Structure formats: structure tokens, C-alpha cells
Image (tube, rainbow, N blue to C red):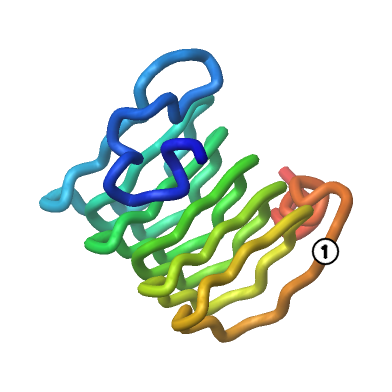
Amino acid sequence: MDGWASNKAAPTAGLNEQGGKPCVLGVDLKIVGQVRSAGSIKVDGTIIGDIECASLLVTNSASVEGSILAEYVVVHGRVSGSIYADKVMLHAEAQVEGDIFHHGIGIEMGTRYDGMLKWTENPSEHYRNTRPSN
């Protein structure tokens, strides 16, 4: 079991494939706008805007309003927006409103989920097709 499987282990256990620690957005932090990272992000606070990163952990105290694109997404908190990820794990305390485009998903009993689940070979392609062209 890796560090993402448990909210307790997640803050320090090898969350970033590059060997680094995740960027932590604290509980008292609110970001309005797009967030991008080549590495992992752990959200304890609030993000209003789209997120693109390698992996994302949304903790119990966190809230995300916007689309998410990542290889791996773990949700313990609240997400309002579509998720595009190879692997998605929704824990029992998660509250998710939005469609999920995934290559693999786990949903614990008790999760509040309202949206469509769509298995796809390439979730990032679906994400890019929803973005306005420049």
C-alpha cells in the first residue's frame, strides 16, 4: 500500500515519482485560478480553478472547484468538477460532483458521488478535448 491509500500516511510517504515531496497547499490557503505542477500536490485548503499535476491528494479539509487532470487522484474531501485521471480513489468521506474519466477507479462505501463514470484508455485526451483551443 502506497502513501496515497491512507490520508494519515500521505503527507510524507513517496508521493512523487521523481523522489520529491508533494507541494502542500495548507488549510488556510485559498487559490483562485489554474494550478499546474509537474509533481504531486496535496490540498488541505481551497482551490477554485482547474488543476493539472502528476498526482493529487484532496484531504478531508480540502475543497476543489474545477477540473482535475492527473495520473493519480485520491479524494477524501470535496470536489466539484470533472476528474480526468489514470487512477482515481474516492474514500468514504469524499463528496464528488462531476464526471470522472478514468483508466481505473476505486470507490469506498459511503462516498457521496454524483456524476458519470467513463472508462477510457487515455483520460488526458478527453480533458484536452474539453479545453477551448487557443
Badge 1 amino acid: Trp
| Residue drawn at x 45%, y 43% as measured from the top left | 4
- The x and y percentages for residue 63 are 32, 64
Which residue carries the number 1 mark?
Answer: 119
The answer to whether residue 2 is above or below residue 100 is above
Q: Is residue 65 left or right of residue 17?
A: left
Taking the view exactly as shown, the residue that stands out farthest to the right is 121
Which residue shows up at 16% across the image and 52% down it?
27
Q: Position of residue 6 (x, y in %)?
A: 38, 50
Given residues 73 and 47, the one toward you in this image is: 73
Vertically, is 113 above or below 62?
below
Kindly give the residue lying farthest to the front in the view shown. 1
Number of marks: 1
Front-most of residues 123 and 72: 72
Residue 70, x across and y down, in percent: 60, 43
Q: Residue at x 41, y 66 (%)?
A: 65
Could you say whether the residue bearing mark 1 is in a helix, strand or loop?
A: strand
The answer to whether residue 134 is left or right of residue 91 is: right
Task: Count residues near mark 1 (Cα–Cα under 10 Å), then give few for <14, some for 14-19, many for 20+.
Answer: some
Q: Quadrant of the C terminus?
A: top right
Q: Is residue 11 left or right of residue 35?
A: left
- Kindly give the residue lying farthest to the left in the view shown: 28
Q: Name the residue located 31 percent from the left edge and 48 percent from the top edge.
A: 43
How far across and down, in percent of the image, does residue 91 sit?
45, 66
